[in-house]
Image (cartoon, rainbow, N blue to C red):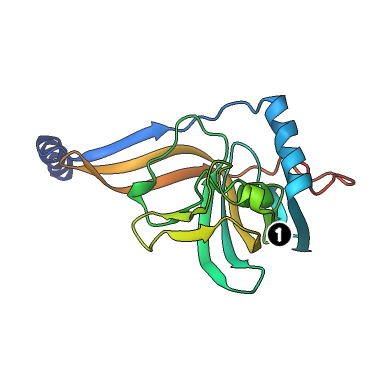
Amino acid sequence: MLKRTVVLLVLVLVQFGCGFKTDTLTHGELPESTGTRWETEKRDFLKIGDLKIGTSPLAAWSRRFDAAIEVHYTDGTVVYEGPTFYYAGFITMPDTSVYDNISLPSSQQGIRLGLNGMTVGGKRRITENKELVCRREATNGCHLVEPGNIGKPAYVRKETLIVEATLTESCIPTDLKVFIWNFFAYTGEIVCRDQDSPQVASGDPIWRFY
């Protein structure tokens, strides 16, 4: 009886365009020249200070990492306080519209580079030169975060920012499972795999890109 019920349910879901879809997430190799350039940007345009060292895993290439951040100008005016996340180095990107969170856009290279190398539970203060606050072609400002299904995009002026960050998660995304209803994606789940490597080696400069 149970088997028959399950079969009927599956047929109904198919009939109405419902079911689950799974996409595999893949990442690309980091070109050596790109890694060198980003290390130069971290060294020249960011002032980074670790307030607390966390534990593995590390925020690094081919990972998703989440952080709680507070961003303010040098005069203390807070422009954003809350969560953010970033996928580093992925070729096939998950559809961030299917879950509630707030993503860090590509224009925020300084915050992305500042989070790189943090460990989960770690706290860091990042002073970001205006050269990295928005894309170089931006004249006045840009979005600091892009919302998913909640919140509003925070706008930031193209000037020096101070970021207080706590890394809350770092994992290797492998799949995105999405529930489809009438051909629209409603809910999604990121399947993530933990891995301790890479790790910060003793003597590594804080501006190294991982």
Asked if residue 198 can be seen in this view, the reply is: no
Which residue type does callout 1 highlight?
Thr
Quadrant of the image containing the C terminus: top right
Taking 54 as reference, is 59 above or below it? Answer: above
Furthest residue toward front: 139
Q: How crowded is the residue under tag 1: few (<14 C-alpha within 10 Å), some, or many (20+)?
A: many
The one of 46 and 200 positioned closer to us in this rendering:
46
The one of 166 and 5 positioned closer to us in this rendering:
166
On the image, the x and y values in percent for residue 171 come to 58, 46
Q: Is residue 75 left or right of residue 108?
A: right
Q: Is residue 8 left or right of residue 96?
A: left
To which quarter of the image does residue 47 belong?
Answer: bottom right
To which quarter of the image does residue 78 belong?
Answer: bottom right
On the image, the x and y values in percent for residue 120 come to 66, 56
Q: Is residue 6 left or right of residue 111?
A: left
The one of 59 and 106 positioned closer to us in this rendering:
106
On the image, the x and y values in percent for residue 164 come to 65, 65
Q: Which residue is mark 1?
A: 127
For image coordinates 52% across by 52% down, the residue present is: 85
Asked if residue 96 can be seen in this view, the reply is: yes
For image coordinates 70% across by 52% down, the residue present is: 118
Quadrant of the image containing the N terminus: top left
**Secondary structure of the residue carrying numbered label 1:** strand
